[in-house]
Image (cartoon, grey):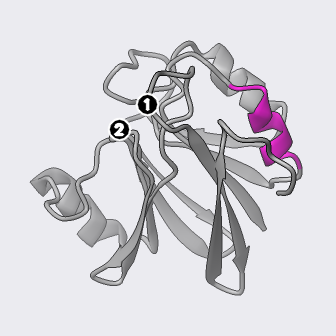
Amino acid sequence: MKIGVISDTHGHLDPLVQNVFSGVDHILHAGDIGPHAIIVELEHIAPVTAVLGNTDFGGTVRETEIVVLDGIKFLVNHIVDPHSLEPMLKERIDRQAPDVIIFGHTHKPFDKTIGGIRFFNPGYSGAPRSNVPRSVAVLHCNNGRIRAKRFDLDQPITRR
């Protein structure tokens, strides 16, 4: 199974995302989406699970989502500090026991296992800004194992 992971679109879906996510089975959006039209565009590629970011308001998107894909439990939440979890989020993590936490907000890629949980941030994917690298990722899941591949949206993308 292939899962597209994106965050911090801030109302801009780079045309390269469609190429990178072509063939994915599901997309996880870790917040700061912008208009709902971004989710609609992503849904033309694959089913989407998305969460609210600190710049998003209303709609049917929630603050935190739990989704099981290929037998792997993902918790998706926009603001996560893997080294200092907010108490309510820590309680939810303890209760839900996810295998992977997908998050955004920092605009910086992150991929580290802490306390047996993999914390993954695909990075910022919105409109180009000076000195802010843009990226998305594809998670290749097979028999409970995950291989992550990050794609730099500011460089030519040749392979998924």
Spot occupied by residue 44 in the image (x, y as percentages of width and height): 84, 31
Res 105 label: 2
Instruction: Look at the numbered discs 1 and 2 and tell me whether their residues touch, using CB distance below 8 Å.
Output: no
Quarter of the image with the N terminus is bottom right
Q: Secondary structure at mark 1?
A: loop
Spot occupied by residue 87 in the image (x, y as percentages of width and height): 11, 56
Res 131 label: 1
Please say if 154 is above or below 149.
above
Q: Residue at x 82, y 57 (%)?
A: 160
Is residue 65 on the magenta stretch?
no
Please say if 51 is above or below 102.
above
Q: Specify start and end residues of the magenta stretch as a single range.
A: 14-22
Q: Quadrant of residue 139?
A: bottom right
- The answer to whether residue 26 shows anywhere in this view is yes
Q: Quadrant of residue 35?
A: top right
User: Mark 1 and mark 2: span between their CA atoms?
Assistant: 16 Å
- The answer to whether residue 5 shows anywhere in this view is no
Closer to the eye: label 1 or 2: 1
